[in-house]
Image: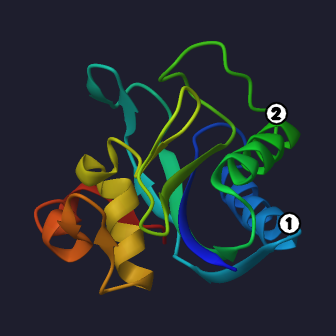
Amino acid sequence: MKTRAVIALGSNLGDREKTIRKALKQIAKLRGVELVAASNNYVSQALTETGFDPDQPEFINAVAIIDTKLAAKKLLSRLNEIESKFGRIRLARWAPRTLDLDIITYGTSLIETKSLIVPHPRAFERSFVLVPWLEIDPEAVLPGFGAVASLASSMIDEVRVQA
């Protein structure tokens, strides 16, 4: 049985565009995963614990929709392996990173463990997740929060499609 999941991708270190492109290919190659759709790349300011920080390098963000046979924790493990291949080091939360992969939704499941919370607890307030997601799924719903179109409507100006 397959589950539809939404994955957010972000990078603000190194060759960001290449990283996002290659990460999408790595996700598509995972056993038990089928890439359904991927958004364009979007540019956003770096988000820190205290808000957007224009002094940090800008992020390139994208969203992918996948169908997967992997359990949510196994999918997270595979995504963490991909991050590691791209040099992701988790020294500090909110730090710049070569690659960040987050599970935004996993079907309609509500999951809360030490290592995984789904839906992503801050997705509802992140334009760099909602706007690219809306691009590839105009009818998307974030479980517990409602229609992505409604959530994103006031945030459209916070991100821009990469030229």
Q: Which of 78 and 84 is in front in this view?
A: 78
Of the pair 81 and 112, the residue shown nearer to us: 112
User: Identity of the amino acid at label 1?
Assistant: Leu
**What is the x, y in percent for residue 135?**
38, 81
| Residue 12 position by quadrant | top right
Residue at horizontal 49 percent and vertical 69 percent from the top: 107
**Residue 120: image x %, image y %?**
41, 47
Residue 20, picture quadrant: bottom right
On residue 30, which mark appears?
A: 1
- Mark 2 burial class by Cα count in 10 Å: few <14, some 14-19, many 20+: some
What residue would you read off at disc 2?
A: 87
Q: Residue at x 65, y 36 (%)?
A: 13
Query: What is the secondary structure assignment of the residue under circle 1?
Result: loop
Lower sequence index among marks 2 and 1: 1
Query: Eyeballing the image, is 81 above or below 113?
Result: below
Amino acid, disc 2: Gly
SS at mark 2 in the image: loop
Q: Are marks 2 and 1 in contact (CB under 8 Å)?
A: no
| Residue 15 x/y as whole percent | 72, 48
Question: In this view, which residue lies farthest toward the top?
Answer: 91
In the image, what residue occupies the spot 37% across and 42% down?
A: 45
Q: How crowded is mark 1: few (under 14 residues within 10 Å), some or many (20 or more)?
A: some
Quadrant for the N terminus, please. bottom right
Mark-to-mark CA distance, 2 and 1: 19 Å
Q: Nearer the viewer, mark 2 or mark 1?
A: 1
45 vs 156, left or right, is: right
* Residue drawn at (67%, 42%) of the image: 99
Mark drawn on residue 94: none
Q: Position of residue 49 (x, y in %)?
A: 33, 20
Furthest toward the front, the residue is: 1
Label tally: 2
Left or right: residue 113 compared with residue 1: left
